[in-house]
Amino acid sequence: MSRIVYVNGEFLPEEDAKISIFDRGFLMADGVYEVTSVLNGKLVDYDGHLTRLERSLTALDMPEPEGMDALLEIHRELVKRNNLKEGGVYLQITRGAADRDFLYPEHPKPSLVMFTLAMTLKKSPKAEKGLKIISIEDQRWGRRDIKTVQLLYPSMGKMMAKDAGADDAWMVEDGFVTEGTSNNAYIVTRAGTIVTRQLSNDILHGITRAAVLRFAREAQMQVEERPFTMDEAKDAAEAFITSATTFVTGVVEIDGVTLGDGAPGPVSRRLREIYIEEAEKMAV
Ligand code: PDD
């Protein structure tokens, strides 16, 4: 049975879903997206993703597509029709089809596309083993707080990591780590403080980041939101990443330097446990 996807008001088998070649998402990367994780058939932190989606639309002056008022129902229907127990829902809104022009069309008709992603999230082998990270220069544009579909540089970054025998890359700008190619980046200092870059236009405001920092503070862990360097990262007791598809995943090697005993550290393992427990509780 083929996957059922959602395109502009219709649920269709994926092979029947079509978008115009004039869609500005295709021609100009004029689109935004969200990935919401699914645990036990339920959506994790749906409100957080919806709020960020609305923020991205506003930042690009992109009107809401039809179907926005029923977005939660569409998510649920898609999960149900695909019998998805664990994974994610990918959602993309573009400014829609228009004659090619750098100026936004005067009467845009935005597109809404959604599909499910089957993934093993809780018992992920990568999370058990921990990730190897390399550093690369951050060559993305300056509005990384908007979750746009222009993901070519992050794609190149993942390829650079793969070619170097690593799992992912952390991006560095003016000597400081911004974030991972598709996740937020953290270190745990030898004194036990969790450090991650503060929110600004330089990074995506991760929904998982917000939840994890809240849980860390509730568990009386020390948190500092400030930039850190790769030297500090290589000297850290632990490191980890967060995202909707990786939750909290330990980093065990940075630019060839092994952290701790080479396994995910106690702080990241504890935060992963807390996050999964809370995510299951808050899922809708
Ligand atoms: N990526 N930073 C970047 C650059 C990201 O692309 C992502 C998410 C995050 C983490 O955000 P959140 O916790 O809200 O997932 C940080 C998604 C998962 C993706 O592109 O597949």
Image: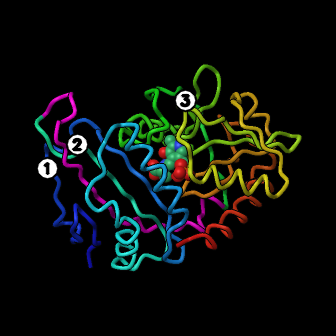
The residue positioned 47% from the left and 60% from the top of the image is 36
x and y percentages locating residue 180 in the rendered image:
56, 40
Mark 2 crowdedness (10 Å alpha carbons): few <14, some 14-19, many ≥20: some
Is the image coloured rainbow, by chain, by secondary structure, or in one colour? rainbow
- What separation in Å lies between label 2 and label 1 (alpha carbons)? 9 Å
Q: Kindly identify the amino acid type of the residue bearing the numbered disc 3.
A: Ile
Q: Secondary structure at mark 2?
A: helix
Q: Nearer the viewer, residue 49 or 245?
A: 49
Which residue: 54% across, 66% down? Answer: 44
- Relative to 108, does residue 198 appear above or below in the rendering? above
Res. 26 mark: 2
Badge 3 density bin: few <14, some 14–19, many ≥20, Cα 10 Å: some
In terms of secondary structure, what is the magenta stretch mainly? loop
Which residue in the protein does label 3 denote?
136
The number of numbered badges drawn on the structure is 3
In the rendered image, the quadrant that contains the N terminus is bottom left
- Magenta segment boundaries in residue numbering: 100-127
Per the rendering, the mark at residue 20 is 1
Q: Does label 1 or label 3 sit earlier along the sequence?
A: 1
Q: At label 1, which amino acid type do we have?
A: Ser
Give the foreground label among 3 and 2. 2
Measured from the top left, where is residue 18 in percent x and y?
16, 58
Amino acid type, residue under disc 2 in the picture: Phe
The residue drawn where x is 85% and y is 54% is 220
Whole-percent x and y of residue 131? 63, 49
Above or below: residue 57 compared with residue 113: above
Residue 193 location in percent, x, y?
A: 82, 42
Mark 2 in CB contact with mark 1 (< 8 angstroms) = yes
Residues at marks 3 and 2, CA–CA distance in whole angstroms = 27 Å
Residue 144 appears anywhere in the view: yes
